[in-house]
Image: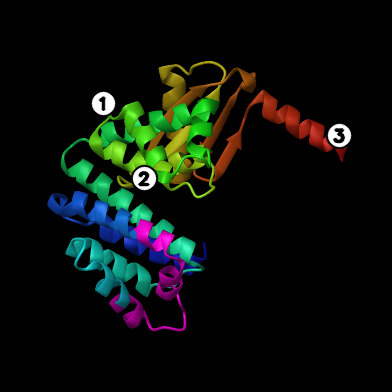
Amino acid sequence: MSNASSQSLAAILKLADSLPGSVAVEAASGLLAAAGVIERESQLRNLLTDGGRTAQSRSKLSADLFASKINAESVEIINAAVAARWSNGAQLVEVLEQAGYRAMFNAAESENVLDRVEEEIFLFARAVSQNGELQMGLTNPAYDAAAKAKLVENLIGGSAHPYAVKVLAHVAANLRGRRTDRMFEEVVDLAAARRSRLRAKLRTAIKLDSSQRARLTAALTEIYKKPIQLDEELDTDVIGGIEVRIADDVIDGTIAGRLRQARHQVAG
């Protein structure tokens, strides 16, 4: 994503973050529904991202389409999104989805359940990354979007918070060929970013003790200048040391990683 697009995305997410808690859930539903419509209708997607049309005309088109169907707050965010410039229509859809997730997290925070929702999304993301059968179910082209959303609801609907279920069901129904584990992890990161913190995903062969976690947290906080949440995953393939992943950054301090590097160097 270009610098201009990144700035536009930040502005859209700020609008979603600033919604009053009383309307945030409805706005989230409206944003996700609109994203679905725009994704399915290629002609509409092209019109809403056509650089040859003015920002005002694109916003008017979106308002005419959605104003009678979803609440005013979500229409305002959609209008702002289509007024911005994006590289392609797929990017607009992703921006609206991210805004919808952030609006849902906004509502969760206003009800003091954001910690629970974030943790439940993280645990589901981990389950997907560790379960090949679940990954196959979510990516099987024989299952339509509704069936994939229903799969998530059947798995966690009876135990997880409704906000977590709604977000995860939408992600499952709208993978669009993207990696399942990465898409769920990105939603976890959006939840963490709601409170201006980062989640560090650790892979280690042996569980860290409290002093090790404290030292690692302090070191990462110093590097990234933001509060850090550690998510630890035990993995015997690591052999020794720790791999840390924060967003797109990977710090590989594992023995396995050093062996891979050595093999590459020997191979030339």
Q: Residues within 10 Å of mark 3 (few under 14, many from 20)?
A: few
Quarter of the rendering containing residue 203? top right
Q: For numbered disc 1, what is the local secondary structure?
A: loop
Measured along the vertical axis of the image, is residue 74 above or below residue 136? below
Quarter of the rendering containing residue 172? top left
Measured along the vertical axis of the image, is residue 179 above or below residue 26? above
* Earlier residue among tags 1 and 2: 1
The image shows residue 198 at horizontal and vertical percentages of 40, 41
Q: Which residue is mark 3?
A: 266
* Earlier residue among tags 1 and 3: 1
Q: For numbered disc 3, what is the local secondary structure?
A: helix
Q: Which residue is mark 1?
A: 158
252 or 82, nearer to the observer: 82
Three-letter amino acid code at disc 2?
His
Q: Quadrant of the C terminus?
A: top right
The image shows residue 38 at horizontal and vertical percentages of 39, 63
The majority secondary structure of the magenta stretch comes to helix
Residue stretch in magenta: 35-60
